[in-house]
Image: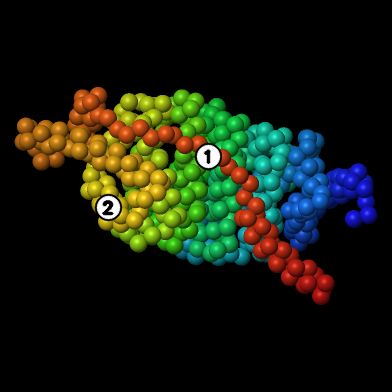
Amino acid sequence: ANLTDFEATILTVIFTDKLIHFLIDEMAICTPTRLSLIINIFIFVLQFKNDQYSNRVIMYLSLLDENDTLNILLNLIAHTIYTFNKKNVEKIGCKKNIISSITNMIGSSILNLQNENIKICFNMTSILILFYELLYLNRNFIFRIHCEIPEDATFFHNDVPKRSSLLSIFIEYLSITMQYIRADENILIVNLCLEIISVMLSDNYLIEVLHNVNFVFDVNLYIKGVKSRNVSVVRKETVPIIFCLIDIICNFFVSNLSRLVPYELLIKCTQILQNCLIYMKKNDIRLIFEWNILWKSCFIMLAYFVKNENCFVSNEALILIENISNILTTFLQYGDHFLYHVDDYLTFYVNILKCPSLIEQLLQIFHKKSCLIKNSKNIYIYNSMDNLRIINQYFLPVIAAYKSSNKVSNVSDEIISDIVHENFENLHLRCLSLKTFENKYNDKLIEILINRIGTKVRHHLTDICQD
C-alpha cells in the first residue's frame, strides 16, 4: 500500500520473473511436492484482483515474449499432460476393469498433491488453469502450441512422442477425461478443458490450425463403446485436429446420455460443434469427414429427450435441444458450403427420412406442453424441428409410391438417396439465420477450481509445518 504505482510494477515484474525461473529450477530437480506449491502460488497470484490496481502479473504474462521462458512453460504443460496420458495407456493395457482403475487413478492423482508416485501429473488442475490463462493472455504462446515438440525438449528426457504437439497431446487428454466424469472434481476438469477448446475456437489463428490439413499429428483417442464399458484406443493419423475433437464429442454424447451428466457440459459441446460448422461455412472449407457420426449422435440425443419428457421442464435442456436443432438446420441450409461431396448431403437426408416418428413425437411434446411455445427460443426450436417434418412429408409419399410401383416392402439407402436427388428442387424450408458465438473468460469456473486447490494447499502446508 505504501509503494508507488511504478515501484509496485517493478516489484511485481521482478517477483514474477524470479518465480518462473524458480519454477524452471525445480523442474530440473523434479521434486513434486515443492513444484506443486510453486505452480499453485503462481496460479494464486494470477487470480489476485484488486479494485484499485490491475493485476501486474497478468500484464507481465501478456507481454512475455522470451523464447526460452515460453518454451519452458509450454514443455512443462505438454510433459505433465503427456505423463498423465502415458499412465492411462499402461492402466488400459494391464487392467481388465477399465472404469474402476481409471476412476481410481483420476481420483487419487488429478487433485491430490501428496501422490509422489506420479511425478508431475499429480496436479493437473493447476496445469490446466495455467494453460487456460496463457491461451487467454499471451499471443506468443498461442503461436507455439501446434508446433511439433523437438526430440531434445526440456523435461521429456528423450521420451518425446513422434509427430506430437501440445495441441495433439491435450486432445488425447480430453478424450480420456471425458470418459470418466462420475466425480464432481472430474466434471470441473472436463468443464475447464471445454473452456480451453472454446478459447481456441474463438481465436482466428488457432481455429485455422484446427481445420488445417497440413498440420499432421498422431493422436490416440480413447473411445468408449455405446453398449460396452470397455475403452478402446483409436489411432488418428493425417487428419485435421478438428476431426478428432468432433469424434470425442460425438462419443461423449452417445456414451453418457443414460448418466447424470450436467447439461452444462453437453451445451458447451454443442456450442463447440456449432462454432466449427460456422467457421467451415464462412470460409467454404470442405473436408473429407464421416459426418454421419455427428448426425446419428444428434438424433440419438433427440430420441433421449423424447423418452424423457420431464427434461423439457429444465431451461438448460431447452438450450441443448435448441443447439442440436441449430446443428441440424445448419446442415439443411448451408451443407453445400462445407460438405465435401453431394453424396454427403444426400446421406444427411437419408438419416432424416429414417426417423419420421422421432420428429413427430418431439413436435407432439411441444404441442402437449403448450407453455413451452411462448418465447422466441422455443418457437425457433419448433420451427427447426418443423423443417425436418417438412422433409419427411415431402419425400415419404414419393418413397411410398416407389415401393408400390416396384412392389417392394423395403428400399435401400442408395435408392432413397436417388429419390431425394431427383425430387430435391421443389423442396422449400424455413430460412433461419446462422448464429455466431463469442467466448468470454469464465472467471466463475476458475474461482471454484482455485478454491479447491487452496483448500488442499493449506492442508499440505499444515502437514509440512508439522513435519
In this picture the colour scheme is rainbow
Task: Identify the residue at image location x=78%, y=57%.
Answer: 41
Relative image position of residue 199 (x, y in whole percent): 60, 41
Q: Mark 1–mark 2 contact, CB under 8 Å? A: no
Tag 1, which secondary structure? loop
Amino acid type for the residue under numbered disc 1 = Phe
Answer left or right for 348 relative to 17. Answer: left
Answer left or right for 239 relative to 38. Answer: left
| Residue assigned mark 2 | 367
Q: Looking at the picture, does residue 404 appear above or below residue 177?
A: above
Using the image as rendered, state which of residue 222 and residue 42 is in the foreground: 42
The span from disc 1 to disc 2 (Cα, nearest Å) is 30 Å
Using the image as rendered, state which of residue 291 and residue 391 is in the foreground: 391
- State which quarter of the image contains the C terminus: bottom right
Mark nearer the N terminus (1 vs 2): 2
Relative image position of residue 23 (x, y in whole percent): 80, 50
Using the image as rendered, state which of residue 394 and residue 122 is in the foreground: 394
Relative image position of residue 38 (x, y in whole percent): 78, 56
Task: Identify the residue at image location x=45%, y=55%.
Answer: 316
Amino acid type for the residue under numbered disc 2 = His
Q: Quadrant of residue 143?
A: top right
- State which quarter of the image contains the N terminus: bottom right
Label 2 neighbourhood size at 10 Å, few (<14), some (14-19), many (20+)? few
Tag 2, which secondary structure? helix
| Residue assigned mark 1 | 437
Question: Residue 121, which numbered label?
Answer: none
Relative image position of residue 188 (x, y in whole percent): 57, 58
Q: Looking at the picture, does residue 417 appear above or below residue 182?
A: above
